[in-house]
Image (cartoon, rainbow, N blue to C red):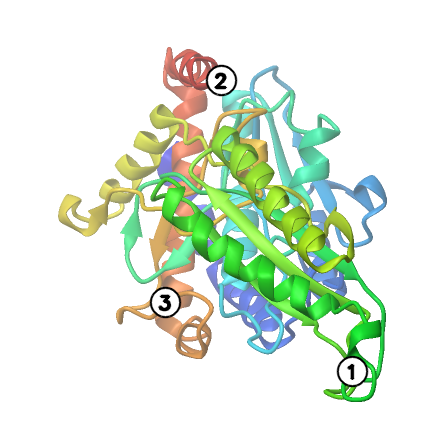
């Protein structure tokens, strides 16, 4: 059965590679992925999937469904297809989404035998306001038995963890004045932002080592001879889990409030992007993916333990259903994500072949989970224990 799945993916490999190249050559930012969404949904319709677009009012979000004639579990493959500003597909999302639909097309060749339902979730804007967050909050994954996706990288890694994250914006309102003639009449909003940065630099010493705080000044004034009456800074606050991230955010906000108090500014605090939870890898499902890599010829010495690579909106999904996010090697040099070098090499034949292998491993892991007696129960029990 699994060989049939892999043969099906191989049969459609050229078409899948063309899709990946098209999306890679037409990078679109989050919630603007019109071409990518159209290409993916058209392909899924051609393969017999029922497609719903505009999910939760998001123009470039979709859910594609194929239901077999037999009852069984619901398997979800997740697609990301947004690009990075100024860098294009330097995170390889053109490969991620094509792996997802390739795995779905492959599994479809066996699902009528095993029973069950395949869903493909098109999830825009992972790099910013990730659509998986409102999808998870709306309960769109609550009836899913397993959710799978894989990320391109410079080596194979098992599904690991990610950092929980909050995106905080601090806006300070002061009073403008002539910086030379009457500075005493002004209230300097930029001073408040600078004090905030200094406070956070001091705070870091008292935080656990897995914590990350990094930010930028998005507005620091208009001219050097005008006391800034408005200044704004944005930060990502991350840690290994939601509990400690929430605790750290409270401390960061106190630093911001202290800066406002010292300068006499008024402070407005907000979240400018969605909050991401940490990824909770489902170990039985992760082991199935790794086993399929081995079956596909990837030796055990080439598959590394999972590492933290930042924050993922898949973390929110992993609180709703069993989920994995392994890494698949698509380049042979240690190019890091979000770099021009990775972007360029992720368009080459080596990367496209790696994408096809990743699609096979995803579909194979899903097939094992559905067809192996007792495996779905082990996946479910591991998920419940993690919660």
User: Do we see residue 76 in this rendering?
Assistant: no
Please identify the quadrant where the N terminus is shown. top left
Question: Which residue is rendered at x = 85% and y = 45% of the image?
Answer: 57
Mark-to-mark CA distance, 3 and 2: 32 Å
- The answer to which image quadrant residue 350 occupies is bottom left
Q: Name the mark on residue 2.
A: none
Between residue 119 and residue 47, name the one nearer to us.
119
In this picture, residue 310 sits left or right of residue 79: left
Q: Name the mark on residue 336.
A: 3
In percent of width and height, residue 9 lies at 46, 50
Counting residues from the start of the chain, the first of labels 2 and 1 encountered is 1
Question: Which residue is rendered at x = 49% and y = 70% of the image?
Answer: 90
- The answer to which image quadrant residue 266 occupies is bottom right
Crowding at dot 3, Cα within 10 Å, few <14 / some 14-19 / many 20+, comes out as some
Q: Name the mark on residue 222.
A: 1
- Using the image, determine if residue 56 lies above or below residue 347: above
Q: Are marks 3 and 2 in contact (CB under 8 Å)?
A: no
Extreme-left residue of the structure? 301
């Amino acid at each position: 059965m699994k060989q049939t799945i892999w043969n099906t993916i191989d049969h459609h490999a050229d078409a899948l590679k063309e899709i990946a190249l098209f999306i890679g050559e037409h990078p679109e930012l989050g919630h603007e992925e019109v071409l990518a969404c159209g290409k993916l949904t058209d392909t899924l319709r051609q393969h017999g999937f029922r497609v719903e677009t505009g999910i939760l009012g998001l123009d470039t979000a979709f859910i594609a469904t194929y239901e077999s004639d037999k009852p069984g579990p619901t398997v979800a493959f997740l697609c990301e297809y947004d690009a990075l500003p100024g860098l294009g597909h330097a995170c390889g999302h053109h490969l991620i989404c094509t792996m997802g639909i390739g795995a779905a097309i492959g599994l479809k060749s066996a699902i009528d035998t095993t029973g069950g339902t395949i869903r493909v979730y098109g999830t825009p804007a992972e790099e910013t306001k990730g659509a998986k967050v409102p999808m998870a909050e709306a309960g769109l994954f609550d009836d899913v038995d397993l959710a799978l996706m894989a990320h391109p990288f410079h080596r194979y890694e098992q599904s690991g963890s990610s950092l929980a994250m909050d995106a905080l914006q601090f806006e300070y309102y002061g009073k403008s004045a002539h910086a030379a003639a009457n500075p005493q009449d002004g209230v300097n909003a930029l001073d408040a932002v600078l004090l905030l940065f200094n406070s956070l630099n001091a705070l870091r010493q008292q935080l656990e080592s897995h914590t990350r705080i990094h930010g930028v000044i998005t507005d620091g004034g208009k001219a050097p001879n005008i006391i800034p009456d408005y200044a704004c800074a944005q930060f990502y606050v991350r840690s290994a889990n939601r509990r400690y991230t929430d605790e750290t955010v409270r401390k960061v906000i106190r630093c911001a409030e202290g800066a406002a108090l010292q300068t006499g500014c008024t402070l407005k605090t907000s979240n400018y992007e969605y909050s991401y939870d940490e990824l909770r890898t489902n170990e039985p499902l992760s082991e199935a993916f790794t086993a399929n890599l081995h079956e596909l010829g990837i030796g055990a010495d080439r598959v590394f333990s999972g590492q933290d690579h930042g924050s993922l909106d898949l973390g929110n999904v992993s609180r709703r259903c069993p989920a994995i996010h392994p890494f698949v090697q698509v380049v042979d040099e240690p190019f890091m994500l979000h770099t021009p070098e990775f972007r360029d090499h992720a368009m080459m034949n080596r990367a496209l072949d790696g994408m096809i292998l990743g699609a096979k491993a995803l579909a194979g892991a899903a097939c094992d989970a559905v067809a192996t007696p007792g495996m779905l129960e082990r996946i479910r029990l591991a998920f419940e224990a993690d919660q």
